[in-house]
Image (cartoon, rainbow, N blue to C red):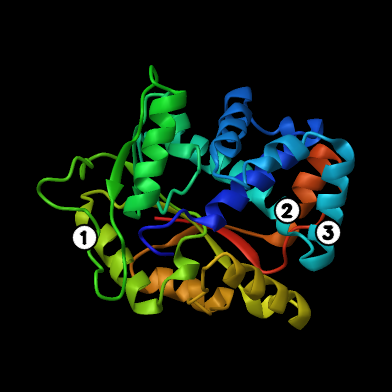
């Protein structure tokens, strides 16, 4: 995305999460504070995006929205819920192992850094300048008396590949750290992803835990693959990491990250469907991985 624009991808992720969590079954997966956070995010979006907050309160509108989304790209909606829910489960497991620092790459409107700042974690968000400024203004407006994550401006491109790590960085290199790359690597070219992974490994004295998502588009039927790519282009983004899951795993391991856990769309779908009683599918080709 461009460094001087609001990320529409991030906005629609927040809108979809907000809309689904109007439904009690989905709402049960998250704390009330998280539900309220995305309510405020959508309320704070610029016109006309903020109109979703009003319309998605109505059951008939939600039904129509879900029907249209599932028609174009089956599983997209539930995969948003799934990645937010399962990333929290992994963070909580790592917390029991002594991890107390979180760095979110390309945070967008995600709540994780803010939420875990209230739980005693040192949290950082790295994002392009416009989004970082927008997010900070949002937190100052709606949560003036709460702990805020440190927001760091960084627009990573093929010409600017350096992460904001260094002697002056406030990110503690000696602290057990969780790196969140949710929907992040897919929009970067391979050499930039490798460079970022290398920098992460070099900076921290204790190898951090990396929680990352991956879309293996080769697993989607052709017409759904077209819908996915078209949707991404519509909001001004472009997928650049065209790797299947085997290639993505190799990319991680060749840069020193050993995969400890991997969830595919079938595993996630069966567990979530059983837990909340939904029949919505999970987007084919969606993976969530935790590596160290």
Any mark on residue 77, and which? Answer: 2
Gap between marks 2 and 1 measured at Cα: 36 Å
| Location of residue 198 (image quadrant) | bottom left
Asked if 103 appears above or below 215 in the picture, the reply is: above
SS category of the residue bearing label 3: helix
Residue 56 is at least partly visible in this image:
no
* Label 3 or label 2, whichever comes before in sequence order: 3
> Where residue 68 sits: x, y (%)?
83, 59
Q: Residues within 10 Å of mark 1 (few under 14, many from 20)?
A: few
Q: Which residue is mark 1?
A: 202
Residue furthest to the top: 145
Q: Which quadrant holds the C terminus?
A: bottom left
> Where residue 213 sits: x, y (%)?
54, 59
Q: Which quadrant holds the N terminus?
A: bottom left
Nearer to me, 59 or 291: 59
Any mark on residue 232, and which? Answer: none
Residue at (55, 56) in percent of width and height: 8
Nearer to me, 109 or 195: 109
**123 left or right of 160 in image:** right
The reply to whether callout 3 and callout 2 are in contact (CB within 8 Å) is no
Residue at (51, 73) in percent of width and height: 238
Asked if 284 appears above or below 129 in the picture, the reply is: below
Residue at (82, 52) in percent of width and height: 66
Residue furthest to the bottom: 222
Q: Residues within 10 Å of mark 3 (few under 14, many from 20)?
A: few
> Where residue 23 sits: x, y (%)?
80, 34
Gap between marks 3 and 1 measured at Cα: 45 Å
């Amino acid at each position: 995305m461009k460094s001087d624009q609001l990320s529409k991808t991030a906005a629609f992720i927040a809108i979809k999460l907000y809309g689904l969590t109007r439904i009690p079954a989905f709402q049960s997966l998250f704390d009330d504070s998280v539900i309220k956070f995305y309510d405020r995010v959508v309320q704070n979006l610029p016109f006309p995006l903020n109109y979703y907050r009003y319309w998605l309160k109505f059951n008939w509108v939600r039904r129509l929205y879900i029907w249209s989304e599932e028609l174009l790209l089956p599983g997209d909606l539930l995969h948003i819920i799934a990645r937010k829910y399962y990333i929290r489960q992994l963070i909580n497991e790592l917390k029991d192992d002594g991890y107390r620092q979180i760095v979110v790459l390309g945070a967008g409107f995600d709540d994780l850094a803010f939420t875990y700042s209230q739980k005693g974690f040192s949290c950082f968000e790295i994002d392009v300048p416009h989004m970082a400024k927008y997010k900070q203004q949002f937190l100052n407006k709606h949560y003036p008396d709460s702990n805020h994550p440190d927001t760091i401006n960084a627009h990573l491109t093929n010409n600017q590949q350096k992460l904001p790590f260094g002697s002056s960085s406030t990110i503690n290199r000696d602290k057990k750290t969780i790196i969140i790359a949710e929907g992040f690597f897919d929009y970067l070219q391979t050499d930039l992803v490798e460079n970022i992974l290398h920098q992460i490994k070099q900076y921290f004295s204790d190898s951090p835990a990396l929680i990352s998502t991956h879309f293996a588009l080769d697993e989607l039927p052709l017409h759904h693959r077209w819908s996915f790519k078209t949707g991404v282009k519509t909001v001004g983004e472009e997928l650049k990491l065209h790797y299947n899951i085997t290639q993505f795993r190799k990319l991680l391991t060749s840069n020193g990250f050993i995969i400890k856990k991997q969830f595919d769309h079938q595993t996630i779908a069966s567990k979530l469907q059983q837990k909340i009683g939904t029949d919505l599918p999970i987007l084919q080709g969606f993976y969530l991985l935790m590596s160290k």
